Amino acid sequence: MTATDARTTPDATGRAGGAGLEVRDLWKIFGPRADKIIGTPDAELSRADLKAKTGCVVGVKDVSFDVAPGEVFVVMGLSGSGKSTLVRCLTRLIEPTHGTVRIGDDEVTSCSESQLRELRRHQVSMVFQHFGLLPHKQVIDNVAYGLEVRGMSKKERRAKAGEVVDLVGLSGYETSYPDQLSGGMQQRVGLARALAGDPSMLLFDEPFSALDPLIRRDMQNEVIRLHREVGKTMVFITHDLAEALKLGDRIMILRDGEVVQIGTPDEVVGAPADDYVADFTSDVPRSHVLTLKWVMRPPRPDDSSEGPVMSSSTIVREAAQAALASDHPVRVVDDGELVGIVDDDAILRVVVAEQAPPGTGPGAGGHR
Ligand SMILES: Nc1ncnc2c1ncn2[C@@H]1O[C@H](COP(=O)(O)OP(=O)(O)OP(=O)(O)O)[C@@H](O)[C@H]1O
């Protein structure tokens, strides 16, 4: 998902698709002498034991991951798992206790204060749950605010803001004030404001959790559409698995500040790393997420060569109709090579499992 659009201008690095992110050995421990804990046996204590012994709380514990330019990377976990702390450490709104963060060519963890300001103004934008709009400014000026801070002329910034207002579907509301807009529309202003400066990365911290379910769905679709149009790298925090599965190219699941699993949606659902992830994913309609890769079997010499041909990344639900309508099993072909066969009953097992009690269907354990 790295499409670009004529409206997108290249970022500071000359790319339109966004910057990559590299996080290594990142820790955030809140409390007294937190930096003395890393590397000692105390660092291995559970969160509760460490708090009891030292008064310190582990927010993020030894987290490493990479996000590719243009990727949508979702960070998911229950309340208190460290999502907000992690995302704030990426631009040092919270100072990490240990570890390195690189965004594009910048090593964030060794930037000076002025370099950090530049990075936050030009490279990385954040969208929060609380929109943080300026109530006395019109939509257009809220969107243009970051450009104003950068010193762009009024004419130029209004022109740029007009473009992104259009991009997020708010044309006609340029002169409205935030309190005249619904929650969903206010969050569109938040999105437009984040996009206005052509950042190479967008960080979303539970931006839609306060919205009604239907509006929330619209906004998720909006993010998918915007991503197709502008192709920015996105790191999206949520505690909602359905949102994570819908938006993420990959998902990182946190528990008590630690990484439990990093994988594509079908990997997280098809091969949960442990019971914690399995519990999370047990209610997911598997046919909506699992791909043929998870249900195919190796080809046999006596298999029919007349079945419908599909790639292993086809979602089971999308394959079901053609597969069940055919008298021959599906031939799974990747790059011209026959890699597997999907029989009707493999499809039915997934579909029927959706009616079964959670956790009892195929794939509820860890098959890979
Ligand atoms: N300033 C702070 N001082 C001490 N502990 C903190 C501080 N900020 C966060 N924590 C603790 O760090 C842990 C991770 O919190 P964090 O807010 O990052 O989790 P979260 O996954 O974002 O949760 P939520 O979804 O509720 O926002 C929690 O145990 C929290 O109590």
Image (spheres, rainbow, N blue to C red):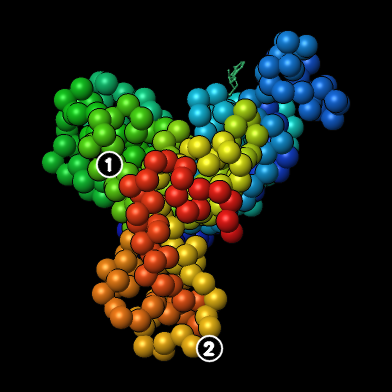
Q: Up-down: is 89 above or below 283? A: above
Q: Which residue is mark 2?
A: 301
Query: Which is more N-terminal, label 1 or label 2?
Result: 1
- Residue 147 lies, in percent from the top left, at 39, 39
10 Å crowding of disc 1: few (<14), some (14-19), many (20+): some
Residue found at the far right of this picture: 40
Identified at 29% across, 47% down, the residue is: 222
Tell me if residue 203 can be seen. Answer: no
Q: Which mark is residue 217?
A: 1
Q: Which mark is residue 156?
A: none
**How far is disc 2 from disc 1 in space, using C-alphas?**
46 Å
Viewer-proximal residue among 35 and 308: 308
Q: Up-down: is 338 above or below 218? A: below
Tell me if residue 307 can be seen. Answer: yes
Give ligand 1's quarter of the image.
top right
Would you say 326 lies left or right of 93 here?
A: left
- Residue 201 lies, in percent from the top left, at 49, 47
Kindly report which numbered mark, 2 or 1, lies closer to the viewer in this rendering: 2
10 Å crowding of disc 2: few (<14), some (14-19), many (20+): few
Q: Quadrant of residue 134?
A: top left
Would you say 19 lies left or right of 356 here?
A: right
Q: Tell me the SS state at disc 1.
A: helix
Would you say 193 lies left or right of 43 here?
A: left
- Residue 101 lies, in percent from the top left, at 66, 42
Identified at 17% across, 33% down, the residue is: 175
Identified at 35% across, 54% down, the residue is: 352
* Three-letter amino acid code at the position of disc 1: Arg
* Three-letter amino acid code at the position of disc 2: Pro
> Which image quarter holds the C terminus?
bottom right
